[in-house]
Image (spheres, helix red, strand yellow):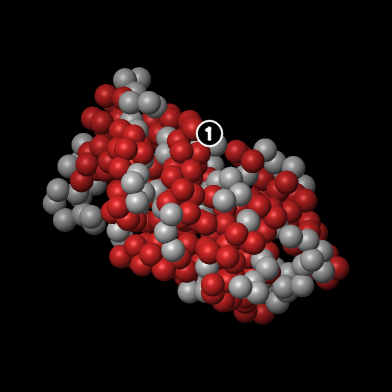
Amino acid sequence: MRDLMPQDDEVDGFGFDRCKGAKERSYLLGLYQGMVRATGAVTSRDLHKWQQENTLAENICRFYDKIPRQYVGGYYPWFEQNKHIVDANTGKPSLLDSALNMTALRAWMPKTRGVTDIGGLRNALTEKEFDVALLYGSTHASYRPSPGMPIWTSFGFCTCRLEDFIQHDEAELGELYKLLMNKCTWTEFHCAYEGGTVEQLARRKGFTEKIAKLKRSGIYLQPKPYSVYGLKEYIAQGDTEVDPILPVMWDYGYLRCRGAREKMQWRDTYKELFESKEHRDEQLHEACIKGKIFEYVKRILPKTPTSFQNLCLNSHGLKGPG
């Protein structure tokens, strides 16, 4: 399957015409590419057949549900929220539909009354409102946000250590959000999210000690939108078929890689770094700004090849992006 976006006459029935913007189209393309390229078990002819049979969403789920969750990447968790893009009439609830505590959400958030699933939430709410609803519904059902979901970044799950990705750090952060939302109204939390003051709200509600404990582990409720989190999301998704977004390529050495092998080696180095207990995302960001990425990586991972030093050069400290 090509890396190019399909043209208008190619998208009928495959969901691209239902996507809201280029980002969703990119995610959907990545979802299909993961099926066709990963094992060769799925062909373009299979996709067309399923589309004609109106079983496309069902077969996408069947393919990805066979893969261990930690290896599934970020496109499928996004698709679980957005199955209606491929099949507006699908009757099988997504994993996220099943996990979300919609009864509790409707009681807390008046605007969601009468809504029964993810598709309904997206249609009824603004983007920021949808983020809050998704956080509330998922944390109240002990469902963890995944890389590729906007709330993974905007609510700080991206700051959790990758090695602990499915366990302690994320559980503590999710529990804090659950307790906080139980102690405030929908309006309070939504306004704090819009204003970037969720941490201040949490402090006012009595969670100062929990916030301090999380910060000691490098975990933040609303982290600044540094490109280091885009790098971390790319590493966590595990998709080796596509390049990271341009700010990540610019800041963290991918533009200087000579071929796929060097990109893979550099990716593996970052993965090991993010899994290290000594690593802190904000320190890597600071090293990036100072043009000292290699020195930072070498300190945490002494066996990093000296040949990687040239990959770490960027224009930060001169005129690079913030």
Q: Please state which of residues 264 and 279 is positioned toward the viewer in this rendering.
A: 279
Instruction: Indicate whether 12 appears above or below 259.
Output: below
Residue drawn at 86 percent across, 68 percent down: 53
> Would residue 98 appear left or right of 270 to someone viewing this image?
right
Q: Please state which of residues 58 and 39 is positioned toward the viewer in this rendering.
A: 58
Which amino acid type corresponds to the residue marked 1 in the rendered image?
Gln
- Measured from the top left, where is residue 295 in percent x and y? 23, 30
Residue drawn at 30 percent across, 65 percent down: 195
Which quadrant holds residue 161?
top left
Disc 1 crowd rating (10 Å Cα; few below 14, some 14-19, many 20+) is few
Q: Name the residue under label 1.
A: 167
Label count reads 1
- Measured from the top left, where is residue 186 in percent x and y? 45, 65
Which quadrant holds residue 207?
top left
- Measured from the top left, where is residue 288 in percent x and y? 24, 43
- State the quadrant of the C terminus: bottom left
Q: Please state which of residues 173 and 95 is positioned toward the viewer in this rendering.
A: 173
Instruction: Indicate whether 120 appears above or below 286.
Output: below
